[in-house]
Image: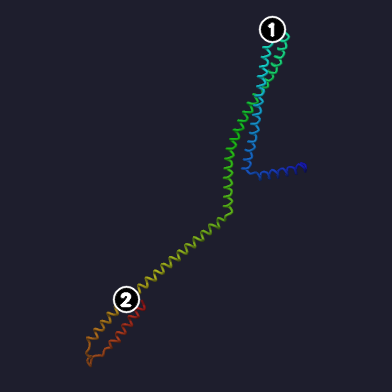
Amino acid sequence: MGLFDRVSRVVRSNLNAAVSSAEDPEKILEQAIIDKQEDLVQMSQAVANANASQKRVQQQYERAHSEANTWQQRAQLALQKGDENLAREALTRKKAQSETATALKAQLDTQLTQVDSLKKNLIGLESKISEAKTKKDMLKARVSAAKANEQLQSTMTSMNTNSAMGAFERMEEKVLMMEAKSQAASELAGSDLESQFAALEAGGDVDDELAAMKAQLAGGSTGQSQLPAADEPVAAPADAVVDAELEALRTQLDNV
C-alpha cells in the first residue's frame, strides 16, 4: 500500500469520525424530512407540468382529428359538385391532419402513462413522508429519553454515593447520641427530684418522732418531783439522757 493511500485513508477516517460525532439525531431527522418535502414539491411541480402538457397534446389531437374530419367532408362536397381537383386537395389536407392526429395520439398515450406513473410516485412519496414524520417523532422521543437517561447516569456517577451515605449514617448516629443524652439527663433530673422529696418526707417523720419523744420526756420529769432516798443511787440528770438520745438520733439521720 502506497503512502498516498495510507494518508488518504487516515484523512477519510478522521473526517468520518468528526462527522459522526457532530451528527445530532434530532437535527438530522428534521433535515431528512425537509429534504423529502422539497422532493415532494419538485415532484408535484413535475406532475403539474406533465398534466398541463398532456392537456395541450389532448387539445391538439382533438383539433387535428376535427380538422381531418372537416377536410373529409369538404372532399366529399367537392366531389359531389364535380370538382375533382378540389376534392383531391381536400383529401390531401385531410391526410396531413390525420397523420398529425395519429402522432399526437401516440404522444398523448405516452404522456398519459408518464402522468399516471408520476402521480403514483407522488402518492408514494407523500405516504413515505407521512411515515417518516411518524418515525421521526418516535425517534426524537427515544433520543430525548436516551439523553435524559445519560444525564441521569452521569449525575449519579459524579455523585460520591458512598460518601453521601456515610454522611447520612454519621448524622443518624449523632442524632441517636443526642437523643440518648437527652433521655439520660431527663432520667437524672427525675431521680434527683425523687431523692429530694424522699429526704423531705423522711425529715418530717423524724421531726414528728422527735416532738413525740420531747413530749414524753416532759411528762416524765413532771411526775418525778421528789428527791431520791439517801441510800438510792443518784440517777443521771434527765437532760443528759435526752441529749445523749438526741445525739444518737442525729447520728442515725446523718447516716440515712
Nearest to the observer: residue 3 or residue 88: 88
Which quadrant, please, contains the N terminus?
Answer: top right
User: Is 228 rendered above or below residue 132?
Assistant: below
Nearest to the observer: residue 72 or residue 113: 72
Question: What residue appears at the point 64 percent right and 34 percent down from the top-left corner?
Answer: 41
Q: To which quarter of the image does residue 239 belong?
A: bottom left
In the rendered structure, find residue 237 and report the number of the disc placed on it: none
Q: Is residue 238 left or right of residue 97?
A: left
The residue labelled by disc 1 is 81
Tell which residue pokes out farthest to the bottom in this image.
Answer: 230
| Secondary structure category for the residue under label 2 | helix
In the rendered structure, find residue 204 and report the number of the disc placed on it: 2
User: Is 46 rendered above or below residue 4?
Assistant: above
User: Is 223 rendered above or below residue 23?
Assistant: below
Is the residue under label 2 in contact with that under label 1 (CB below 8 Å)?
no
Q: Position of residue 167 (x, y in %)?
A: 53, 59
Q: To which quarter of the image does residue 68 belong?
A: top right
Q: Residues within 10 Å of mark 2 (few under 14, many from 20)?
A: few
Q: Earlier in the sequence, mark 1 or mark 2?
A: 1
Question: What residue appears at the point 31 percent right and 78 percent down from the top-left corner?
Answer: 207
Q: Is residue 152 left or right of residue 64?
A: left
Q: Position of residue 65 (x, y in %)?
A: 66, 17
* Amino acid under disc 2: Gly
Q: To which quarter of the image does residue 110 belong?
A: top right
Q: Is residue 4 left or right of residue 153?
A: right
Mark in front: 1 vs 2: 1
* Amino acid under disc 1: Lys
Q: Position of residue 150 (x, y in %)?
A: 59, 48
